[in-house]
Image (cartoon, rainbow, N blue to C red):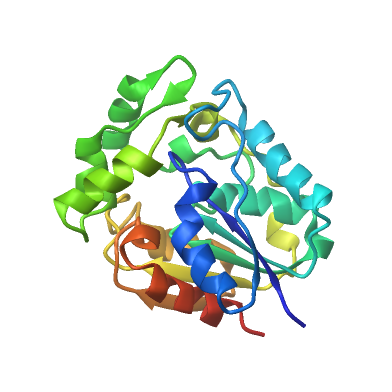
Amino acid sequence: MQYTYLLIHGSWHDGRAWNDVAKILRNQGLDVHTPPIAGHGPHADYRASHADCVDSIVEYVRQHNLKNLVVLGHSFGGTIVQRLAEIESSRIKRLIFHNAFVLRDGESLYDMYPPIFHEIWEKITIDNKIMLPFEIFRELFIGDVELEKAKEVYDNFWSPCCAASHYDKVPLKTFESLSIPRSIIYASTDNALPVGEYGWHPKFSNRLNIYRFTELPGSHEVLFSNPQKLTECIIHASRP
């Protein structure tokens, strides 16, 4: 059986963030989809709710009749993967969480942030959208590339996202009971969340109970800094 790969981007990204990874996967003859999430991207409607974000991906999956899916969520995209799994579980063969949030019923991303982030997020939430300043992006998200590369990524691939994607409480009534296999891909030098109590691993990974674990060095934006290695991890994480 050949899988279809559905790559779900994170906050401040759109589907173009996966360009390098998707190209490598497609060169191996794989079917890859990288849809934009509602409320994300330079020309999005930032009034979108978290439910609207989910609906946009559910609609994409149904319109394209995607089956035998390996669904990967990066960062905020993990919450979309969780809801998609609840709604379209019969289409999905494996879930992959790449430095991603894994929520419990009724939680929001904002609830998962360390207290020091709350003050920052409230300051940068304006007119239904959030835009992360370059200084924070550089220090916390992409410290594994030279400054010129960081600026290139920020200028060309970084844009506002709908604020509701961070603040809305997410209903997840059935996710924990699903039997779909899960994998973790952990970029170990990711500083977008501080290592420890609030970090990606093991806090969020352990919420999956049983999972396959794959690790690589790299920042939160390893999809830009080392797409080849990330692609290798995706293949490893998705094998039967």
Which residue is at the far front? 27
Q: How many marks?
A: 0
Side of 32 relative to 165 (left or right) = right
**Residue 206 visible, this angle:** no
The quadrant in which the C terminus is found is bottom right
Classify 29 as above or below 72.
below
Residue 175 in picture, x, y percent from top left: 70, 56
Q: Nearer the viewer, residue 166 or 233?
A: 233
The quadrant in which the N terminus is found is bottom right
Side of 208 relative to 127 (left or right) = right
Question: What residue is rendered at 80% in x and 53% in y?
Answer: 64
Residue 212 in picture, x, y percent from top left: 54, 78
Classify 94 as above or below 125.
below
Question: What residue is rendered at 53% in x and 64% in y?
Answer: 22
Q: Nearer the viewer, residue 34 or 85?
A: 34
Classify 182 as above or below 232.
above
Question: What residue is rendered at 40% in x and 73% in y?
Answer: 228
**Residue 200 visible, this angle:** yes
Residue 35 in picture, x, y percent from top left: 62, 48
Q: Quadrant of residue 126?
A: top left
Q: Quadrant of residue 39?
A: top right
Classify 24 as above or below 17.
below
Residue 239 in picture, x, y percent from top left: 62, 83
Side of 213 relative to 171 (left or right) = left
